[in-house]
């Protein structure tokens, strides 16, 4: 339910995000026009802040829980661990998109009719 409500989520946590993705995000952020006039000392801090924000958008555990916007998914899991006394972890998830993975056959209607007529 949470994954379906958050289309940006691609990873379980920020630790699972590959370094290539992080470096790509840094390159994109540092190249934005609004940062060109900033001093270099401030530029690094601004880029780091934006990167952290972006990585939290990509992480499932850092998302706000859709039924209770006051807590994150990670907080919800920790609450349930305390209640149940069992360890709960999310290791992976799969997002199913409507129509994805289906093979569409490209059929010519005229050929289908001709085949049907030839079989008779």
Image: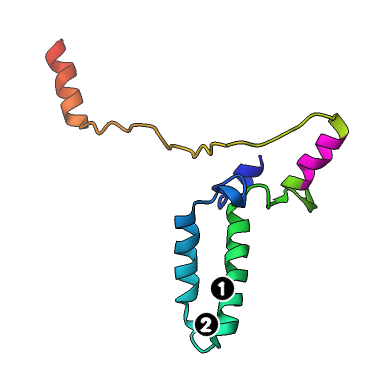
Residue at label 2? 35
Look at 49% across and 67% down and name the residue there: 26
Where is 78 relative to 62, above or below?
above
Q: Residues within 10 Å of mark 1 (few under 14, many from 20)?
A: many
Q: Which residues are magenta?
A: 75-82
As drawn, is 61 to the left or to the right of 101?
right
**Regarding mark 1 in the picture, which secondary structure is present there?**
helix
Look at 48% across and 85% down and name the residue there: 36
Query: Is residue 56 within the magenta segment?
Result: no
Majority secondary structure in the magenta region = helix
Residue 85: quarter of image: top right
CB within 8 Å, label 1 to label 2: yes
For the residue pair 1 and 15, the one nearer the viewer reads as 15
Whichever of labels 1 and 2 marks the residue nearer the N terminus, that label is 2
In the rendered image, residue 33, in percent from the top left (x then y), is placed at: 47, 82
Residue at label 1? 47
Query: Is residue 80 within the magenta segment?
Result: yes
Where is 84 relative to 31, above or below?
above
Can residue 67 be seen by looking at this rendering?
no
For the residue pair 109 and 103, the one nearer the viewer reads as 103
């Amino acid at each position: 339910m949470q994954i379906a409500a958050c289309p940006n989520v691609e990873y379980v946590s920020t630790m699972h995000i590959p370094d290539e993705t992080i470096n790509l995000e840094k390159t994109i952020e540092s190249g934005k026009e609004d940062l060109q006039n900033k001093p270099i000392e401030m530029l690094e801090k601004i880029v780091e802040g934006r990167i952290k924000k972006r990585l939290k958008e990509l992480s499932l555990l850092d998302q706000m829980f859709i039924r209770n916007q006051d807590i994150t998914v990670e907080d919800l899991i920790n609450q349930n661990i305390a209640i149940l006394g069992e360890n709960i972890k999310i290791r992976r998830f799969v997002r199913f998109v409507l129509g994805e993975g289906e093979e569409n056959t490209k059929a010519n209607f005229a050929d289908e009719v001709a085949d049907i007529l030839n079989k008779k």
